[in-house]
Image: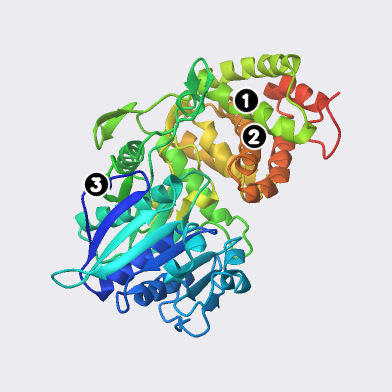
Amino acid sequence: MTAAPAPSGPDTIGELTLADEEATRRLASDLALAARPGDLLALEGDLGAGKSTLARAFLRALARDPELEVPSPTYTLVQLYDTAPPAAHADLYRLGDEAEVDELGLRDILDDGILLVEWPERAPDLLRQASLRIRLRDAPNGGRIAQIDAGDARAAARFRRTLAARHFLEEAGHGDTLRAPLGGDASARGYETLAVEAGTASLILMDSPDLVPGPAVRGGRPYAAIAHLAQTLAPFVAIAGALRDHGLAVPTVLRADTGAGFALLSDLGREGVLDAQGRPIAERYEASVEALAHLHAQPLARIVPGPDGAYRIPPFDRDALSIEVSLLLDWYWPDRYGCPASPDDRAAFDDAWAPLFDLAEDAEHHLLLRDVHSPNLLWQPDAEGIRRAAFLDFQDAMIGPTAYDVASLAQDARVTVEPELEARLIARYCAARRQQDPGFDAFRFEAAYAVMSAQRLTKILGIFVRLHARDGKPQYRRHIPRLKQYLTRTLPHPALASLAELYGRWRLLDEDGPPS
């Protein structure tokens, strides 16, 4: 599949040369990865141009079923499919009048589904709603040419991205590989599995577009800059190398294009750290915390080799700590109380956190990975020791209190870690650290653990509300009661006395009731 020169307009994607039927099917599969509910894909071209071939492959990719029966809708005019999201395939060649479009319910399909339409030019009003127009014609020297245009800039960005991923795979020697979605996370990153030849190790495509910083929120800087979030793919590649050098199990970066935001990774499997009921498996959490103890006992390097030269790992400094906890006031507070936090409330909040940030600055520091919890851990049953637990998400790694990652694991935001297991994980970590360094100060660590736990949970309360309110991801709200339970468990630590008093006075963790 060969792309034409750069597109001429913001909504023009360009021309692709499709050498054979398999190339047409690959294009359809790639487009299915980028399609979203509400998309209308208009398939244009003469008889025999390949419209049905593309539609059939698109629907099979959407259903993740290469054998899905996809009959022609020539006589039925429309065929419905129970895919995720739902889809419909329409052929308007026999359409008598455009009014029949509404009788067929085609526009209704776009409320929560995807619509593929052959001969869309027979319904000009419907065609104007197309998210993507694909015009197929014969190529002079065989094969086909697909002219692809998007209905708007947002659709263009989505579909251009999936074609850029195919270009990256072509350059990596996997241009003929079929792709399937693996899922993403709370960020814009996404992952795909690649179908490779039998007997060959499977691969993962990581799609990590550059971070859009957002508006300035403090001191003329956006949140991402203050919190030291990774702006590009480069930090992931650099930290992966550093962790591997320290003996931890992480994906091998086989190829990366940091400018385009794509990486080809080794596939570490699908076996996680939870049981069939979604509960933590103690042995696997303990192996993970021992891997953290091993990492924190190694010499600390603040500058590591990166794909674009030396990479300086940013600090988890006071500005980052502060901007993170402020998410509670910015998002959780108005969601809970129906009004913004007052200047007096913000001042009391800052006063309560100031001595805790002092304690964090005085705590033991090392490389912290930031998101050590069940979605980012894979079990390696054939490995030994600390390599039994593999770490996946670390592009936002910083230099900060070692207690942070232990708290992230022992108070997993996605699943409930009971108090007994949390205590075991802390004890296991401290024992491993003392074994490597008899001078390890467990009391100092436990105070830092309480502070980092409170800091992280306060931040995530704001993030999970933000994911719903701003990003349209309501599924994260179901974890909020668990976060409150963890905070209720943590706040009695003496180091948190002032914060506990403030949160109690605000009735922040109660089921109901405004602050007093």
Q: Residue 58, image x and y in percent?
A: 41, 70
- The quadrant of the image that shows the N terminus is bottom left
Residue flagged by tag 2: what amino acid is it? Gly
- Relative to the observer, which residue lies in front, 243 or 51? 51
Binning the other alpha carbons within 10 Å of mark 3 as few (below 14), some (14 to 19) or many (20 upward) gives few
Residue flagged by tag 1: what amino acid is it? Ser
Residue labelled with disc 3: 6
The residue mark sitting in front, 3 or 1, is: 3
Q: Contact, CB < 8 Å: mark 2 with mark 3?
A: no
Q: Secondary structure at mark 3?
A: loop
Residue labelled with disc 1: 326
Residue labelled with disc 2: 462
Q: Secondary structure at mark 2?
A: helix
Q: Residue furthest left?
A: 141
Can the viewer see residue 380? no
Can the viewer see residue 438? yes
Q: Residue 483, image x and y in percent?
A: 68, 41
> CA–CA distance between discs 2 and 3?
41 Å
